[in-house]
Image (tube, grey):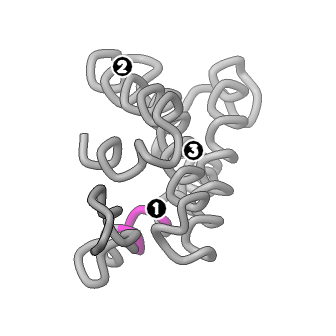
Amino acid sequence: MTLYALTREQGPILALLALTCRIAEAIQYGESAIYFSVASLIFSWLLLRGRLIPTWLGQLGVVASALLVVILPAQLAGLFGGTMSWASSMTWMVWLPMLFFEVIFAFWLMIKGIAQSAPQNSLPSV
């Protein structure tokens, strides 16, 4: 919900779609990773587009999420070593960029926060 609140000004429809994917991730069992990756891709794109986080961090999030969006359905189809198993080195290689992004992003939010634009004053100055 917080990521939606932070990114809705950059793209309200995309932010709502990402929030919907996060809700679907919470209630789905088998395909929850796909919903997670789609939501992360959208939120990362909106954070990057709004310059709410550093460019390098936003780009890492977009690339890591896009990698998951492409590879996870292919894994479910039997490519790249079949279904996801945490014992597989392929699974770790696919998820490693997302791990880096999530950990760095979490620390960034705790330490620096996000770049907020100055609030628009609705009253004209006299």
Q: Secondary structure at mark 2?
A: helix
Q: Secondary structure at mark 3?
A: helix
Say which label, 1 or 2, has the lower sequence index. Answer: 2
> Which percent across, then down, holds residue 94?
62, 51
Tell me the quarter of the image containing the N terminus.
top left
Judging by the rendered image, the residue that carries numbered circle 2 is: 24
Residue 41 is labelled as 3
Q: Which residues are the magenta region?
A: 101-105
Q: Nearer the viewer, residue 81 or 65?
A: 65
Residue 55 is labelled as none
Name which residue lies at 57% across and 65% down.
58
- How far apart are the two marked residues, 3 and 1, measured between alpha carbons? 14 Å
User: For mark 3, does the 10 Å Cα neighbourhood hold few (<14), some (14 to 19), or many (20 or more) residues?
Assistant: many
Q: Nearer the viewer, residue 90 or 60?
A: 60
Give, as a three-letter code, the residue at label 1: Leu
Q: Secondary structure at mark 1?
A: helix
Give, as a three-letter code, the residue at label 2: Ala
> Which percent across, then down, holds residue 50?
54, 60
Name which residue lies at 71% across and 21% down.
78
Residue sitting farthest toward the front: 126
Residue 99 is labelled as 1
| Foreground tag (1 vs 2) | 2
Q: Nearer the viewer, residue 15 or 99?
A: 15
- Position of 79 compared to 116: left or right? right
